[in-house]
Image (spheres, helix red, strand yellow):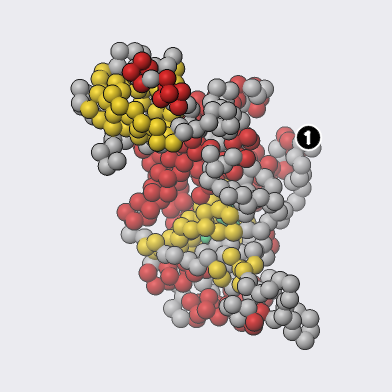
Amino acid sequence: MSKRIKVIDIFTASVDQNYTVMGWVRTFRNNQFISVNDGSCLANLQVVADSDKMGEDLTKRITSGAGISISGKLIVSQGKGQSVELIAEQIEILGDCDPETYPIQLKNRPSLEYLREIAHLRFRTNAFGAIFRVRHALAYGIHKFFNDRGFFYMHSPIITASDAEGAGEMFQVTTLNLKDVPKNEDGSVNFKEDFFEKHTNLTVSGQLEAELAALALGQVYTFGPTFRAENSNTTRHLAEFWMIEPEVAFNDLDDNMDLAEDMLKYLIQYALDHCAEDLAFLEQRLLDEEKNKPQAERSEMSLLQKLNFCLEHPFERVSYTEAIEILKNSKPNKRGQFQYPVDKWGADLQSEHERYLVEKHFKKPVILTNYPKDIKAFYMRMNDDNNTVRAMDVLFPGIGEIIGGSQREERMEVLLNRMQEMHIPADEMSWFLDTRKYGSVPHAGFGLGFERLVLFVTGMTNIRDVIPFPRFPGSAEF
Ligand code: 4AD
Ligand code: MG
């Protein structure tokens, strides 16, 4: 088995030599042409087989989806559409695939909805092969970006007792017997009997732990799974998603915005440089999908144009207060076309508002800053107006919020005040407060939703299609 060459490498291998290729049959035409894919790249290798030599029994077993090993000579292709082809000398079926029951029939392009139901097999389509190769490249690019800038990768815990965002949308973790839950005298659950001897949950964010590390190591980032039990059945939300959270000592909000913009541009460029073939395919996929939509709903730019556009333009930096004015006076607001009309300062922005700002008004990525304190988390640094905090959300076309972050409140008194106002129990957070007690310094950070980035770069429209096995309300398959 070790002598196999991957399909991606055979395209640049010397011709007139013998090679062994292993993969899965995509199609088999005219009892002669087998296209083989091994996942290493989008392109299939064309294999030319001689059915007389193979015999009927073997020919019958060459079906879409079958695992196959082929040895033969690589030659410059005689036909159009490929540079080289392999003339089969020996063919072995590694695993049969019954064409009658195989759920992936490539002839009539399977819908994304259908493929989501068979997510265990959807890797075998061109689209999902491309998506997950791009996803990999972006993950690698993230580590490279931070490593090259002297950041340290910090593993934040997955099980925790803290609610970092203070939003209470957590999955509980327990080994208590749910049929016989131990109770306190007042009827509440006695978590002293639980595995950790306290109430625990899956983390919603690694930020607070990243802050602890940043205030000693200087610049760190996390990249791990996070969990939200919010009942959001949308194309932008998952119950389990991956988040990248850099945290930097001595940075203020402007530094934070610069880092976020640099990082996003770096990652888009990284994908363009390393995933050209897959992105070209995904661009065409999007064009095909949009052909069936009315003109008004089609994208103004192709995928690659959109990615390049984001690279070429500085992101627009606007305060929340300015954004509210723009939205109040916008046509859709005046015409009552927003589901949530914008009438007063202080309201949280909905995805329709974010997308209006990005797609219609500024027509480029936007960073919104200085939000009202009441709609943001307790740890954000208070401005001198005592009314807004140094928050920033990065908004992207077609996505809305892709990053949320802030400069952190480093002043103990102010932080304690905020925690009290927001009913965050300070006694359970003494470990966090110690950073403010001992050598507190200004610092800032943000969280990038990894799947939202993959969504943007691949031009897909549903977040459930850019994570291998999506978790959302009512579904935890595979
Ligand atoms: O804005 P969020 O909630 O911010 C935080 O969690 C901060 N602790 C981050 C920080 O400052 N270190 O989430 C950050 C990002 C969002 O902008 C969004 O991209 C993504 O995480 N996100 C989700 N992605 C998919 N499904 C969900 N349910 C998401 N919730 C947030
Ligand atoms: Mg947010």
Would residue 301 be visible to someone looking at this image?
no
Looking at the image, how many numbered discs can be counted on the residues? 1
Between 425 and 477, which is closer to the camera in this rendering? Answer: 477
Tell me the residue at 53%/75% (across/down). Answer: 432
Q: Quadrant of residue 353?
A: top right
Tell me the residue at 75%/40% (across/down). Answer: 338
Between 316 and 93, which is closer to the camera in this rendering? Answer: 93
Q: Is residue 366 above or below residue 291?
A: below
Under mark 1, the amino acid is Arg
Tag 1's secondary structure? loop
Would residue 14 be visible to someone looking at this image?
yes
Tell me the residue at 38%/53% (across/down). Answer: 143
Q: Is mark 1 within 8 Å of ligand 2?
A: no
Q: Is residue 450 left or right of residue 327?
A: left
Quarter holding the N terminus?
top left
Which residue is situated farthest in the bottom direction here? 185
Q: Quadrant of residue 112?
A: top right
Between 468 and 261, which is closer to the camera in this rendering? Answer: 468
Query: Residue 288: x percent and y percent?
Result: 56, 23
Query: Residue 278: x percent and y percent?
Result: 43, 32
Between 306 and 276, which is closer to the camera in this rendering? Answer: 276
Q: Whereabouts is ligand 1, in terms of quadrant?
A: bottom right
Q: Is residue 62 left or right of residue 419?
A: left
Query: Residue 214: x percent and y percent?
Result: 42, 68
Q: Is residue 71 above or below residue 319?
A: above
Residue on which disc 1 sits? 335
For the residue carrying disc 1, how many other residues have a C-alpha within 10 Å: few (<14), some (14-19), or many (20+)? Answer: few
Tell me the residue at 59%/65% (across/down). Answer: 202
Query: Residue 463: x percent and y percent?
Result: 58, 43
